Amino acid sequence: MPHSRWSQKGQRPVAVANCSGAKTDQGFQMLRQATLGDVDFITGDYLAEYNLAQNAEAMAAGKHEGFEETAWDGLQQSIDAIAEKGIKVVINGGGLAPERLARKTTELVATKGYELTVAFVTGDDLLPEIKEALVKNGKLPDHLDSENNDVTLVKNLEDFADMENHPLVSANAYLGARAIVKGLEAGADIIICGRVADASPVIGAAWYWHGWSDESYDALAGGLVAGHLIECSAYVTGANFAGFFEYDLDEVVDVGYPIAEIEKDGTCVVTKHPNTKGMVTVDTVKCQFLYELQGDIYLNSDVKAYLNDVAIESIGKD
């Protein structure tokens, strides 16, 4: 039977917690987000180009299962709390093998006797298609922006055509939130993704909760900003903050991880569980907001956000 929280779907802001911003975030962070307070979703971003490539080489050598061990560890530690509290989980810790991690998670759920539905999102791995194009045509497929005069591509892009000296080990598209939304609509409680964009698990959670459409552009852009603010785990709660020296050192060690409470219009409140270290202030949010931006338009697989009118204000402690 669905948890009572899901009868509130769309009637209040959705509380989306993040438990990982990289493969090095430990599994207990998922458990903390599930148990230190109340949230509707737990999301996690475990992927970057470096670990996708490392894992691809190790996987090809038979030395890696393809998914992130910290994601699997988090699920094992947290599955009891997830089931008890009716929390849904959306993570991209499936890496190069989301189906494999989803099947292990399904076995874990069955062993525990829980009635949880596990789904996985795939389709991001384009390595076979890229290699085929290189063999057939001697070059990479045309870049999507190859005819856009406002976009400058890297000069050495065609070096990959030399497969002997520059062998490709991984090629992953950044998928968006649409498959995540479809999975949630189909009844999934845990969704294991491959390479979806960093913010897309958060966008997907809010999209599903509020019933947005493909053309809810402002709300989706707000979801993108919310996802960007919490996607790097502790960055927004004090770990990527130039003003850290104004606080006691103990306050910025082992900080709490963030939560975005996302409204139907896409606006959000960034917070963290009570009685955890770190801080959520206008300054910490600004520091994370500016992280990785390359201009006043933020591109994403689901939507693009125009950032000139984004406002950040304090409404209370943390």
Image: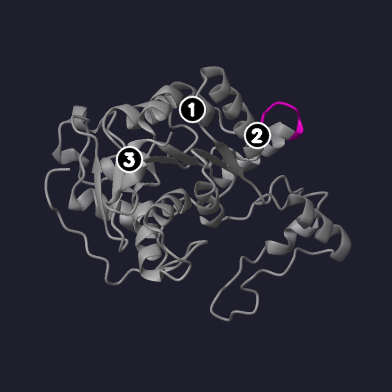
Q: Residue at x 28, y 60 (%)?
A: 267
Q: Amino acid at mark 2?
A: Gly
Residue plotted at (77% across, 48% down):
167
Q: x and y percent of residue 21 in the render?
A: 43, 41
Pointer 2 residue: 66
> For the point 27% across and 71% down, which residue is it?
309
Q: Relative to 295, is 73 above or below?
A: above
Which of discs 3 and 1 lies nearer the camera? The answer is: 3
The reply to whether the C-beta atoms of the residues labelled 2 and 3 are less than 8 Å apart is no
As drawn, the residue found furthest toward the top would be 111
Q: Secondary structure at mark 2?
A: loop
Q: CA distance from mark 1 to mark 2?
A: 16 Å
Label 1 Cα crowd, 10 Å radius (few <14 / some 14-19 / many 20+): many
* Sequence-first tag of 1 and 2: 2
Q: Is residue 176 visible?
A: no
- Residue lying furthest front in this view? 1
The percent coordinates of residue 215 (x first, y second) are: 45, 71
Residue in the picture at 67% in, 62% down? 156
Determine whether, in the image, residue 272 is placed left or right of residue 79: left
The answer to whether residue 41 is left or right of residue 60 is left
Q: Nearer the viewer, residue 187 or 139?
A: 187
Please say if the residues under marks 3 and 1 sit with CB atoms less than 8 Å apart: no
Residue 111 position within the rendered picture, expressed as x and y whole percent measured from the top left: 56, 18
Pointer 1 residue = 75
Tell me, yes or no, if residue 23 can be seen here. yes
* Numbered disc 1: secondary structure: helix
Magenta span: chief secondary structure: loop
The verdict on residue 211 being magenta is no
Residue ID for mark 3: 5
Q: Which residues are magenta?
A: 60-66
